[in-house]
Structure formats: C-alpha cells, structure tokens
C-alpha cells in the first residue's frame, strides 16, 4: 500500500508540472453487498446464509491520466475487509475441513482488486470547456483493455471446537479482459456506463457499473455510482463464486 501511495504522489506531481496532462484523482466510500458460494463434492455453502455476510463499507479510489498518453490510463482500486459469526444450519465443508450443523463459526474475508485500464477515447460532436480541461459533447466511447489483479483470502474457524484446524482459501488472479465505456456529457454533468468481462478455463471475471459526476469549474468533482464485481475460480477442490456490488460516493479533483 505504501508503494501505491508513493506512486500516486509522483503521478500527481507530474500532472501539476505537465500542462498537457489531464489528471483526475477521486476517492470515496462504497457500501457493498457481499454474496456468493463455495461448492465442492461434499457440500455447497453460501456467504449470505451459512457465513452470515451482508453489507460492508469500504474505501475506493481512482486515478486517470488523459491526453498526453496513448492509450489513456485509468486505475481503480478497492479493499474489502469483513468478518462474521454464525451458527450453522447445515453441515459444510471448506478446503476439506468439515464444520458440523449447529456449531458456531467465525470467518474473515479480505478482498483486494486493482483494475488498470488502458483505453483510447473516441469523441463525437463535442468541444472542451474550462481551458481544455473538460470535454463536453454528445458522446464519448472508450475502447481498451483491463488488466485486473484480484487477491481474495477467506478463513473460517470453529468457535465450538477450538482444537479444530482453521480452514482457508487464498486466491490470487491476473487477467486481461476487453473494456468498453460510454460517456455522455451535458455541460458540467458526466454520465458514464462501463464494463468488462472474461472467461478463461476455470476462471471468470465480470466488472461493470456506472456513475453520474458533477464537475465544478475549479476542478472539484462529486460523483455517485454503482459497481458490480464478480469472480469465479476453482481452487483445488472448491469452486468459489464471489460477488460484491453497491453504491459508491466519491469526491475528486481534476488537475
């Protein structure tokens, strides 16, 4: 995380020095609903019912460089950390560890995702506002690639039987998927829809959403949006499906 912060500071400094660069930095909070399942030959357990996961608050940020770079670059990052306790209503099996019906369990999830988007923008009928810092027109279409890094750690232990070994599934994934976005500009308002998806062998990722942004003349940006993230992956004997989706509230600045 320290390396990411240092990298952002360097990019911000560079953006202030280079007049040709349009740099937008946004950060905010996201309320995410967590769901999905762990499926194997012994049982199928769900994160909502068996592990008692619901909604969680997490931080998120984005960084975008435009104009001087071909293709343009946009970085999206979020980090979800959540835990839950529950009394099992059925027998479950996680990573070959069995947990009996009626036992109390405690579990933790850490979910990090970094999306590095490389895209070319196609502008139609528009012009620039605020001394060449904000495009305003009928439509913009972005086409490119999303290099997505996912790290997902799940640990579960029995509270009823403290001597029982902890079960864990740790996943790291790197995939590159096609990316598309549609942006519509009306004066200071930007409306955006975006998405990318890829299925490869036993792995699948889906990432889509949209937002509405208001750009103030001094570079301040306020936005509200919706994002959906899903991955499916087989880790040894477990087929893991995990979803997070919800509303984002972000504050930003355009340099």
Image (cartoon, rainbow, N blue to C red):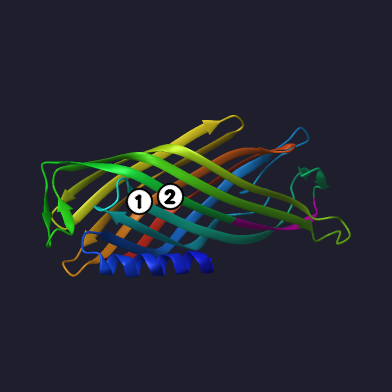
Q: Residue at x 86, y 59 (%)?
A: 161
Residue situated furthest top in the rendering: 201
Q: Which residue lies most toward the right here?
A: 163
**Image mark count:** 2
Quadrant of the image occupied by residue 109:
bottom right
Give the x, y percent position of residue 9: 40, 70
Looking at the figure, which quarter contains the C terminus? bottom left
Name the residue at 45% across, 50% down. Answer: 115
Q: Is residue 250 left or right of residue 98?
A: left
On residue 73, which mark appears?
Answer: 1
Where residue 179 is drawn, which disc sits there?
none
Image check: 246 left or right of 120?
A: right
Q: Quick check: 40 above or below 160?
A: above
Give residue 28's quadrant in the image.
Answer: bottom left
Q: Is residue 28 above or below residue 206?
A: below
Q: Is residue 7 above or below residue 69?
A: below
Whether residue 252 appears in this view of the structure is no
Magenta span of residues: 102-110
**Does 82 sit above or below residue 177?**
below
Residue 116, numbered circle:
2
Q: Residue 107 or 124: which is nearer the viewer?
A: 124
The residue carrying pointer 2 sits among few (fewer than 14), some (14 to 19) or many (20 or more) residues within 10 Å by Cα, namely many
Q: Nearer the viewer, residue 147 or 245?
A: 147
Q: Is residue 109 magenta?
A: yes
Q: Secondary structure at mark 2?
A: strand
* Residue 120 position within the rendered picture, expressed as x and y whole percent measured from the top left: 29, 42
Q: Residue at x 46, y 69 (%)?
A: 6
Residue 31 horizontal/vertical position (percent): 46, 59
**Magenta segment: does it hold 149?**
no
Q: Is residue 68 left or right of residue 127?
A: right
């Amino acid at each position: 995380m320290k390396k990411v912060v240092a990298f952002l500071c360097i990019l911000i400094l560079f953006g202030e020095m280079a007049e040709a660069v349009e740099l937008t930095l946004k950060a905010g909070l996201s309320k995410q609903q967590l769901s999905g399942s762990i499926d194997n030959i012994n049982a199928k357990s769900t994160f909502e019912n068996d592990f008692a996961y619901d909604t969680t608050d997490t931080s998120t940020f984005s960084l975008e460089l435009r104009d001087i770079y071909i293709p343009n670059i946009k970085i999206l990052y979020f980090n979800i950390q959540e835990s839950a306790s529950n009394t099992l209503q059925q027998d479950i099996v996680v990573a070959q560890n069995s947990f009996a019906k009626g036992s109390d369990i405690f579990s933790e999830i850490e979910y990090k995702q970094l999306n590095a988007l490389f895209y070319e923008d196609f502008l139609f009928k528009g012009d620039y506002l605020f001394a060449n810092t904000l495009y305003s027109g009928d439509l913009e279409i972005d086409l490119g690639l999303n290099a997505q890094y996912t790290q997902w750690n799940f640990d579960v232990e029995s509270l009823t039987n403290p001597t029982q070994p902890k079960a864990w599934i740790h996943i790291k994934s790197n995939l590159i998927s096609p990316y598309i976005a549609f942006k519509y500009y009306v004066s200071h308002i930007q409306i955006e829809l975006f998405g990318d998806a890829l299925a490869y062998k036993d792995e699948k990722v889906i990432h889509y959403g949209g937002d509405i942004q208001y750009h103030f003349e001094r570079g301040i940006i306020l936005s509200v949006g919706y994002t959906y993230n899903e991955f499916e992956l087989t880790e040894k004997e477990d087929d893991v499906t995990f979803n997070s989706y919800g509303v984002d509230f972000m504050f930003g600045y355009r340099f």
